[in-house]
Image (cartoon, helix red, strand yellow):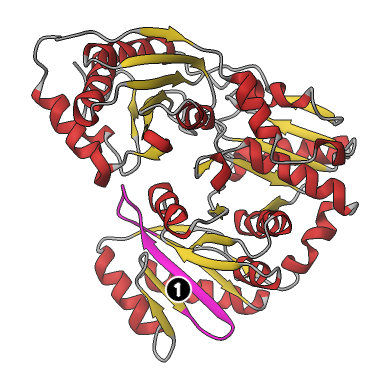
Amino acid sequence: MTLDPAVFKAYDVRGIYPTAIDEAGAYAVGRAFVEEFEPRRIAVGRDMRTHAPEMAAAVVNGARDGGAHVVDIGMVGTEMLYFAVGSLELDGGITVTASHNPKEYSGMKIVRRGALPVGGDTGLSAMRERAEAGFGPVAERGDLKELDIYPDWTRHALSFIDTSAIKPLRVVLDAANGMGGRMMSALLGHLPLDAIECYFEPDGSFPNHEPNPLLPENREFIVDKVRSEQADLGIAFDGDADRCFFVDETGEFIPGDFVTALLAASVLEREPGATIIYDVRASWAVPDTVEAAGGTALINRVGHAFIKQRMREADSAFAGEVSGHYYFRDFYQADAGSVPALLMLELVSMRSQPVSEILAPFREKYFLTGEINTRVDDVALKLQQVKEQFGAGQEISHLDGVSITAADWHLNVRPSNTEPLLRLNLEARSAALMESMRDEVLALLEA
């Protein structure tokens, strides 16, 4: 069995196949999940990676040997596993995916009843210990049945918008040979779009570019395509399509905080006074927009486990993260790539303005660095230095790393979960101030 303890991350299981995790390791994860949480019925899905069928079959066997009855939902986007677990009222689920990672990777995202995530602090560490200890004889093997979840998922995703409001927009869609192509194909037949479908064929070798739109080199294609096709909008998906990213009609990338603000405004039109959650890295554009629309904005730690828990506590209608994860109460408090894409298409249709004009009020007022990673030798020391040098007389928060808020700028510096990195996000009221503050903070971090 190959199951490197390092594949158990903060939020999921992920590592290089087969040197860090192989089919026997996948079997152990499936069985450990069932023995730890004792679910009666679970769903198992997989993405399009070349080794995913064998890895998913191993997870199914492990879960069944642990005694769980398994619903195999086949090749799906990760949000479809969340939907299956929530809508079928199952006790949990596992999807075999390595999300946006390169083709060499495999992994799993795991949830309990209600699509609640299983992470390092919520059972994943205990699962690792069970897997490492080994298993006893099989007492009673669970049943297996297959289910096509696409029809029900399609109806549910489309229920978030008024499909009759969608105009025949010219839209470039880049699925990067991930799960976004199959998912969007199920939705596009219900929409009157002039859709330019790019790399829709699922192919785990990723022959065109890696499925990680957060990296600028992976956005080059859609930026050029939007411009050459004179499209109204570009939408790109990551590998398992639980995140989507947007490009305006000029080819300019739209930061996740601005997307969060736009989607929050849409949600508040439907549900006046709703509570919206955003993460500590986000632009002031989010709370400003939410409060102007009559909603309540709550700031939160980064990470889907923390976001989903806070959504339940606050009965929040919507949450957004800078990284492109968007969560909806009516989607089992889970993140989805399809729903924000649909909401953005509806918003652009109803505004009857170019996307760049819709974004102009944000771009003229809020100046962002985006996330900048710096490798450091001593994370704790650098955080303390940031606080001492920039925090005097300012508002300081330790909700997630160090956040400092001044009258005309604010920053967050937080450590990576997996590497000796500090991640800086900074915003200011002018481009010049943003650039000077960015350079000062980076000089400290790199010293």
Q: Quadrant of residue 365?
A: bottom right
Q: Position of residue 334 (x, y in %)?
A: 50, 41
Q: Position of residue 130 (x, y in %)?
A: 14, 28
Q: Measured along the vertical axis of the image, is residue 366 above or below residue 58?
A: below
Observer-nearest of 304 and 374: 304
Disc 1 target residue: 441
Q: Measured along the vertical axis of the image, is residue 377 above or below residue 68?
A: below
Mark 1: few, some, or many residues within 10 Å (few <14, many ≥20)? some
Q: Residue at x 19, y 25 (%)?
A: 35
Quarter holding the C terminus is bottom left
Q: Is residue 362 left or right of residue 298?
A: right
Q: Residue at x 33, y 8 (%)?
A: 143
Q: Measured along the vertical axis of the image, is residue 23 above or below residue 217?
A: above
Furthest-bottom residue in view? 393
Q: Quadrant of residue 420?
A: bottom left
Q: Is residue 280 visible?
A: no
The magenta segment: 405-422
Q: Secondary structure at mark 1?
A: helix
Q: Which amino acid type is marked by label 1?
A: Val
Q: Position of residue 89 (x, y in %)?
A: 44, 29
Observer-nearest of 218 and 203: 203
Observer-nearest of 22 and 11: 11
Whether residue 416 appears in magenta in the rendering, the answer is yes
Q: Residue at x 84, y 59 (%)?
A: 357
Q: Residue at x 91, y 51 (%)?
A: 352
